[in-house]
Image: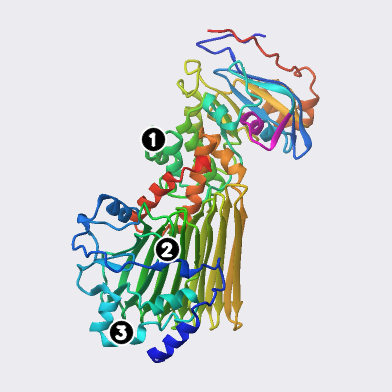
Amino acid sequence: MSNNDQKRKAEAAKEKKATFGEDIELQKFGQGRKDIAEEKNLENLSEEDRKTLLNVGVIPSEEGRAGSFLLMDNSVVHQRQMASGVEVMNLQGALKVHDWLKPYSWNAVAPDADKYTSRTFLEDADGYFIHALPGQKIVNPVQTCLMLKSKETAQTVHNIIIVDEGAEMEVVTGCSTSKHVDKALHLGISEFYIKKNAKLTFTMIHNWAENIGVRPRTVVKMEEGATFINNYVSMKPVKTIQTYPTAFMDGANGVCSFNTVAVAHPGSEMDMGSRVMLNAPNCKAEIVSRTITTGGVMIARGRMVGAASNVKGHLECKGLILNEKGVQLAIPELEARVADVEMTHEAAVGKIAQDQVEYLMSRGLTEDEAVGIIVRGFLDVGIRGLPPQLKAEIDETMEQINLAKM
Amino acid sequence: MGWVGIQGKGENILEIENLSVEVGGREVLHDVNLSVMSGYTNVLFGPNGSGKSTLLMTIMGFGGYKVTKGRIMFQGEDITHKNVAERAQMGIGLMMQRPPNLVGVQLGTLVKTMTKGRVKPDALAKELDLTNFLTRDVNVGFSGGEIKRSELLQLTAQNPCFVMLDEPESGVDIVSIDKVGTKVHDLLVGTSCAGKMDRSGKASLVITHTGQILDYVNADRGYVMCKGTVACSGNPRELLHEIRTKGYDECISCNIRRRSPQPLKIEEA
């Protein structure tokens, strides 16, 4: 499709509401700033910004990282590549130097999918381009951070990750809000391409604030023997998130896993889904979500479509209600288009089992301590594959949310 | 009452007075009277469904066990309406028959949390062949015998003054029984314990069907429960012998032994 065609379609989709989630009036939000100064050394950022980075697993010293990328509003503030075998740069820059990259841009995600993709397309949004070269096993993770710095603006982001044939890579992305930013939007388009026998582990930590709206649009295309592991963590308050990343397993013998851990605080509405299309023989997929509401609305969607022989899938949505005002809605969906598939699901919502709490209390733990350890264990199951340093940071966040006061 | 206080023994650490308990709207314990002297090991016999486990769960304070009459005194204090944690902190500990699974909570983490880091679980785990279990989720996929050893590990770390064991030997294989028995012995005869009465020695209430655990602990007194109440009490070995040879009917109908133990007055130290 020519760029003009895409543009025409995007223009036509300017007011197109998304299928799920509260409709956001985009005209209320100005364009994200593009004039924030570049910073070669992340350690020269303000203490507040450095702390914001650390809270989402992005290390300012860049120690033990293969590369870094930092976007503040719509400004590329930092990009650095430290390991060989991997390219880390801004997408608009990459499109200029790599002719071959164009067909990948706005290929997996359609510009006219909804008003959010439309705006991101029409603003020619920038974001990260991360490319693992063929056969390269990148030892350290690449870290990226997308930060909201100004109020009443919409950050638009367009990211592309390509893991070339036989390569392996881990990417850690933190999304965050600067302290003083009250009301803002984040629209993030991500297109991931995982080639033959390649592997991508993608971990995203969301750390928004009370009045932030978030509309990520992520599509993953997987070839034969590809592996995709997606970890998503959101523990802090947010006004509204609606996300439904989709993986297309188009090659045989692929492995795909979505793990979600999220907390809906009072006033938060979180509509979170994961979708896997098992389009090729012998593919395996797993969707696990562990969610908590402390007063907000939590919707956990999951959808698997088995469209090839001998595919296997398991979908698990478990939700805890820790406050009477909270809502948990679990919507697991399985669709089989051929006979030879094996797909199962398990969904459960409710309060913490009293017998577990009392069992721990009989060991001398207070009720609050008992609830805390059970909730932590409940969430832990959702993020077992997480790198240790990230887990430690998440543990700290769990401490901070002070379960006793829920 | 012919019980003599020796080395801190002699005071009643636990007194249960006319206790009736409902589970799910049905009365399952009726007018239970039972007392446990500090430093004494007490054995609870009785056929299946006679209310032994219910009694232990009620003493621990679990929510599904509603006291409709009577009271539970522990260390001279009425604990009938205290919550589970308060009772545990006073020095009551329980090895449960069927503890719940704690998904996501590792055994080692639990031991460190409950002891506020004072107890390193490694050595204890080694003694009970549970080294590989410290990183496993508590009770998840544990066999019957593994649950017993895990419960014993937790109780040893907890070190309560008053130990309640619900069939500590059931499901334990013949190789592990010696380890479990020895550990139960160590737990019961230990002289210092958490809670107030740490100089008074430990007291215990042990449910057993087979009496196998009596090879490892020197039981002082036995009770037989039947149809939701304490039917008789006496020398635990004699009681066991009678149950083995004549069954429960004989024991329960034996009026000579029937005497509800009278609660003793607590003497303030």
Which mark is on residue A62?
none
Measured Cα–Cα span from mark 2 to mark 3:
26 Å
Q: From the viewer's perspective, tell me whether residue A340 is left or right of residue B16.
A: left
- The type of residue carrying mark 3 is Leu
Q: Are marks 1 and 3 on the same chain?
A: no
Q: Which residues are magenta?
A: B56-67
Determine the chain carrying the residue at label 3.
A
CB atoms of marks 2 and 3 within 8 Å: no
Q: Nearer the viewer, residue A406 or A306?
A: A406
Residue mark closest to the camera, 2 vs 3: 3
Q: From the viewer's perspective, tell me whether residue B32 is left or right of residue B139.
A: right
Q: Dot 3 corresponds to which residue?
A: A101
Query: Is residue B174 in sight in this rendering?
Result: no
Q: Is residue B66 magenta?
A: yes
Determine the chain carrying the residue at label 1.
B
Residue mark closest to the camera, 1 vs 3: 3
Residue neighbourhood size for the residue with mark 3, other residues' Cα within 10 Å, grouped as few (<14), some (14–19), many (≥20): some
Label 1 secondary element: loop
Label 3 secondary element: helix
In the image, residue B185 lies at what x, y percent? 50, 28
Q: Dot 2 corresponds to which residue?
A: A231
Measured Cα–Cα span from mark 1 to mark 3:
55 Å
Residue neighbourhood size for the residue with mark 2, other residues' Cα within 10 Å, grouped as few (<14), some (14–19), many (≥20): many
Reply above or below: B251 against B65.
above
